[in-house]
Image (cartoon, coloured by chain):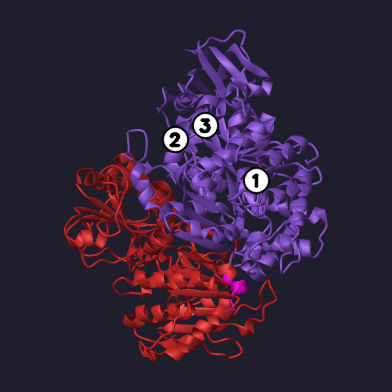
């Protein structure tokens, strides 16, 4: 079986291909070089079409405890978007907290072929994988959350050496079946359990005496030394607090040049100027990112309307509870490991703060120079549901459209932003970097996000349209591992993607400490905490793909 | 998990029979006979040691092959106008396969204990809550308030594992922990500390709990109460409890929704949860809903992620249609709205289907006996004994792997329902 995709206009930034007309050959789900003597079985004419790798969402809350709390909590939100069963598709629901099945279908229909759950609590990782297992078509994976867990803070409080911390980080990553490490409000989730209500970068946890800065340095170093390709994924201190931009800049400058990814940075880019004591810090944030090549960021753009915020940051979610809309919310302390908070939220275009949040996000996109270091996210569903990505792409690619929307927002917020003066429009190539090549590189996916030889045949084909929202909403074709799953914007086949992980090498003698630790303090045995490879394969539909480590790792 | 195959002894086995899912059991298996050697209790030991009796499926009382039984079920579902998949006492993959069948057969789904879990779900959907999990309790609790339940009957090892554990991560003086019962009094001594300190009991009738909880919340909020007694409890005692809650650094207020068996108990759960939120303005406090026996948390979780809704969701209109009242399977059966009932009960032989006029299919634990023989009975394996599986603990956060301990040949609920789905 040899498939030839003929004559498409290719955007493949991983190979520097910027809109060239080329053919693509697919065999056994992989992209191959043009074979010399093999007959083409199927040829698809893509002349006049735009071809990119399948898009990759590097930060989307698609699975795990807090997402399922959000689903259960919001029957009224689902009711506006229930989906009937078809011959091909299971029933489900969409909008803010979609069912797993619907999420997979809708990602595919938008040309996305992978999504990564950014906040897997190790103790809840089994559930996150169960849910991702029930998410069709797209590949998946996730980042294991550390930084408020008792074991790490205990190690740091007793000044364990970096090697011991590396072993613990690698052990956690391995047994929670993750591809990266995330830290959320470093140490803050833990501090909240001791009734601390805020934790600045250099503020000490009451019990352990450890600071967020120390946690970030230890974990970022572990990630680097273990050769984990995805940099430490950081949801910083003081999310949503006016004036937090200084902490955010301090966080980036203080990481001593280690690779670090700042997630949903929009929520961490606020100043305190003006009558409302709330202002945009995006210029300083973007300048800091531009200056520090070790830093990457995704934006966490907000878009107007009803959504739900689901976060591991129970300290900040608790502080935000007066803003819950509708007025219901959940905060949880979880297993001396982490926590979560779930708050429905409605972003309003006539709210000064919400309008400025929208502008801050877009300013950040437009002022970070290097599209390889900034990523397109809404922190689904926290800023907006992922289904709004085509709209967001249009805001980035179409200045006139952007300024038209801007002119309808809260007038004082318009005055407080210089968004209207930013002329940049993202090019097709830059969009392909941000949503494909860059995202694959950032997550550490060697065989995804590009169209070169050996790459998985995850391919999205669009019809060029000046209305970029329309164009990116409805691809002509989506290929997943070489199979056509979407045609003319509609799903025609349901496949099941793989789970991407990394398996760093480490000294397993860490279990000599962990086993008695679980026995003494926990309510689950260490052996039952570990998620086996078989659990990912599960009923046969799942699979594991082990991605290569960076050089400098122990392998 | 260790399997010493020579002696047939398994260690670090988890119990799917009790919502706290203790996973420190030692179990001996000889042939089909299972014996709990260590860390068993009344609930868990019975769960593991129930013997296998039937191994063959039956249709209308006659033994048939599994294939024949599956075909019969598929035919019944195909001709049904309103099927219900009830019981839902199964593991992760059993619940997944039940959801797939419900979607395809346009059935309504419900769990056997939904009337209990709905008391919590309705609060989640109306105002939310602040809750915690078992390891947090074990390491942090300084004041435990038990509302409306005799905890040790349903959760015999709760106090041993979560309150009177030897040590805490944070060097807490375990002996200083306080336990207060509000409502039902404890029937045994599980809540008494190893040093002999007994729980304080403020007892009242279930019917008075709504009022008692309201007064306690009011006191926590600093309101002045004119009455001197409420539900037979002195308001001065409740004032003391309110003060204890405000002084505690990490109080935990626990309840078992199934034991709050009075009309609109969800309103009492809500008062309790709002009180916990009030306390958190100054100190830390958490709710701890206990429940989750018979796979009820698992069923609700799977349903929520696959459809967006918990139990009591009807697929009759080909999309998920959640209604905690209309889709109450007991109400539907009592009202003759159901023509086919698929009853899944793979953990407990005592949990048989409710009497109804619906044609009844039982995927039940071997050993189950019936007053009225169901139209189809398939003895299925028990998750964590006859086949591997995964189940959620009461806190809805931790899920544990269940091991296959013996080779009984009994099919899993997943095997049966997947075959049914394919036959549909």
Return the residue at label 2.
Answer: A106
Residue B225 appears in the rendering: yes
Instruction: First in sequence, mark 3 or 2: give its number.
Output: 2
Under circle 2, the secondary element is helix
Q: Position of residue A336 (x, y in %)?
A: 62, 64
Instruction: Confirm whether circles 3 and 2 share one chain.
Output: yes
Give the magenta-colored segment's residue range.
Answer: B137-143
> Counting other residues with Cα less than 10 Å from the Cα at mark 1, is it few (<14), some (14-19), or many (20 or more)?
many
Under circle 1, the secondary element is loop
Q: How far apart are the alpha carbons under marks 3 and 2?
A: 9 Å
Q: Quadrant of the C terminus of chain A?
A: top right
In this structure image, what is the colour of chain A? purple
Q: Nearer the viewer, residue A79 or A538?
A: A79
Q: Chain of mark 3?
A: A
> Counting other residues with Cα less than 10 Å from the Cα at mark 2, is it few (<14), some (14-19), or many (20 or more)?
many
**Image height of B282 relative to A28, above or below:** below
Q: Nearer the viewer, residue B328 or A329?
A: A329
Return the residue at label 1.
Answer: A269
Q: Residue at x 73, y 37 (%)?
A: A287
Say which of marks 1 and 3 sits in front.
1
Q: How far apart are the alpha carbons under marks 1 and 3?
A: 28 Å
């Amino acid at each position: 079986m040899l498939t030839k995709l003929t004559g498409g206009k290719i955007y493949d930034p991983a190979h520097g291909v910027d809109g060239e007309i080329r053919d693509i050959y697919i065999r056994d789900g992989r992209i191959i070089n043009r074979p010399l003597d093999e007959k083409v079985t199927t040829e698809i004419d893509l002349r006049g079409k735009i071809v990119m790798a399948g898009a990759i969402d590097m930060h989307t809350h698609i699975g795990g405890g807090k997402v399922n709390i959000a689903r259960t909590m919001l029957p009224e939100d689902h009711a506006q978007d229930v989906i009937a069963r078809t011959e091909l598709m299971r029933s489900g629901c969409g909008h803010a907290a979609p069912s797993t099945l619907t999420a997979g279908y809708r990602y595919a229909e938008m040309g996305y072929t992978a999504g990564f759950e950014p906040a897997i609590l190790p103790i809840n990782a089994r559930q996150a994988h169960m849910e991702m297992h029930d998410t069709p078509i797209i590949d998946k994976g996730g980042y294991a959350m550390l930084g408020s867990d008792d074991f790490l803070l205990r190690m740091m409080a007793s000044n364990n050496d970096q090697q011991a911390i590396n072993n613990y980080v690698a052990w956690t990553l391995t047994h929670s079946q993750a591809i990266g490490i995330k830290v959320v409000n470093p140490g803050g989730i833990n501090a909240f359990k001791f009734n601390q209500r805020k934790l600045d970068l250099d503020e000490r946890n009451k019990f352990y005496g450890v600071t967020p800065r120390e946690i970030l340095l230890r974990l970022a170093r572990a990630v680097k030394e273990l050769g984990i390709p995805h940099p430490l994924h950081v949801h910083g201190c003081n999310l949503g607090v006016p004036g937090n931009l200084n902490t955010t800049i301090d966080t980036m400058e203080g990481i001593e040049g280690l690779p670090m990814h700042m997630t949903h940075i929009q929520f961490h880019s606020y100043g305190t100027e003006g009558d409302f004591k709330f202002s945009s810090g995006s210029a300083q944030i973007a300048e800091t990112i531009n200056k520090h090549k070790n830093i990457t960021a995704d934006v966490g753009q907000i878009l107007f309307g009803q959504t739900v915020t689901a976060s591991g940051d129970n300290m900040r979610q608790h502080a935000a509870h007066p803003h819950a809309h509708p007025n219901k919310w959940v905060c949880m302390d979880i297993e001396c490991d982490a926590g979560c908070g779930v708050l429905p939220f409605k972003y309003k275009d006539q709210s000064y703060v919400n309008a400025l949040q929208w502008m801050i996000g877009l300013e950040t996109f437009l002022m970070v120079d290097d599209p390889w270091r900034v990523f397109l996210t809404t922190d689904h569903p926290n800023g907006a549901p992922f289904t709004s990505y085509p709209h967001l792409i249009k805001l980035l690619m179409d200045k006139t459209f952007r300024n038209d929307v801007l002119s309808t927002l809260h007038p004082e917020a318009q005055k407080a932003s210089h968004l209207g003066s930013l002329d940049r429009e993202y090019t097709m190539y830059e969009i392909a970097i941000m949503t494909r090549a860059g995202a694959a590189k950032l997550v550490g996916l060697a065989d995804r996000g590009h169209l070169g030889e050996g790459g998985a045949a995850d391919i999205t084909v669009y019809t060029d349209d000046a209305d970029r929202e329309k164009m990116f909403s409805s691809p002509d074709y989506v290929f997943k591992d070489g199979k056509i799953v979407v045609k003319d914007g509609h799903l025609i086949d349901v496949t099941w993607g793989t789970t991407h992980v990394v398996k760093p090498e480490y000294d397993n003698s860490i279990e000599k400490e962990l086993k008695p630790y679980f026995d003494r303090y926990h309510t689950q045995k260490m052996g039952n905490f570990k998620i086996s490879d078989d659990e990912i394969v599960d009923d046969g539909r799942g699979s594991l793909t082990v991605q290569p480590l960076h050089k400098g790792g122990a392998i | 998990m260790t399997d010493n195959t020579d002696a047939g002894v398994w260690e670090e086995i988890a119990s799917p029979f009790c919502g706290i899912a203790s996973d420190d059991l030692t179990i001996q298996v000889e042939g089909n006979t299972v014996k709990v050697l260590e860390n068993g209790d009344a609930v868990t030991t019975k769960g593991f040691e129930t013997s296998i009796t039937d191994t063959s499926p039956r249709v209308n009382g006659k033994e048939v092959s599994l294939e024949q039984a599956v075909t019969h079920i598929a035919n019944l579902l195909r001709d049904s106008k309103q099927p219900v998949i009830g019981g839902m006492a199964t593991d992760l993959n059993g619940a997944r396969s039940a959801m797939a069948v419900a979607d395809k057969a346009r059935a309504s789904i419900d769990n056997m204990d939904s009337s209990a879990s709905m008391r919590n779900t309705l609060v989640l959907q109306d105002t939310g809550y602040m809750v915690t999990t078992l390891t947090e309790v074990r390491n942090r609790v300084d004041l435990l308030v038990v509302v409306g339940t005799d905890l040790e009957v349903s959760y015999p090892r709760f106090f041993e594992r979560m309150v009177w554990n030897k040590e805490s991560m944070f060097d807490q003086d375990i002996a200083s922990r306080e336990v207060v019962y509000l409502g039902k009094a404890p029937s045994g001594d599980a809540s008494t500390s190893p040093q002999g300190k007994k729980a304080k009991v403020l007892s009242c009738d279930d019917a008075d709990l709504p009022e008692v909880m309201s007064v306690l919340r009011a006191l926590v909020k600093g309101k002045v109460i004119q009455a001197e007694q409420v539900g037979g409890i002195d308001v001065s005692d409740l004032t003391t409890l309110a003060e204890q809650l405000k002084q505690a650094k990490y109080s935990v207020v626990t309840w078992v929704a199934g034991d709050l068996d009075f009309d609109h108990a969800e309103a009492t759960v809500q008062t309790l949860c709002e009180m916990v939120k009030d306390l958190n303005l100054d100190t830390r406090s958490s709710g701890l809903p206990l429940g989750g026996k018979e796979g009820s948390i698992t069923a609700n979780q799977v349903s929520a992620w696959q459809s967006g809704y918990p139990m009591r969701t009807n697929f009759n209109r080909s999309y998920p249609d959640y209604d905690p009242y209309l889709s109450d399977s007991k109400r539907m059966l009592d009202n003759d709205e159901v023509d086919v009932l698929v009853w899944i009960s793979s953990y407990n032989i005592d949990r048989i289907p409710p009497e109804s006029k619906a044609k009844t299919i039982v995927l039940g634990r071997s050993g189950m006996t019936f007053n009225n023989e169901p139209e189809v009975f398939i003895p299925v394996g028990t998750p964590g004994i006859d086949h591997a599986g995964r189940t959620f603990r009461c806190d809805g956060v931790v899920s544990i792997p269940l091991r296959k301990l013996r080779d009984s040949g009994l099919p899993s609920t997943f095997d049966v329902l997947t075959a049914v789905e394919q036959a549909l």
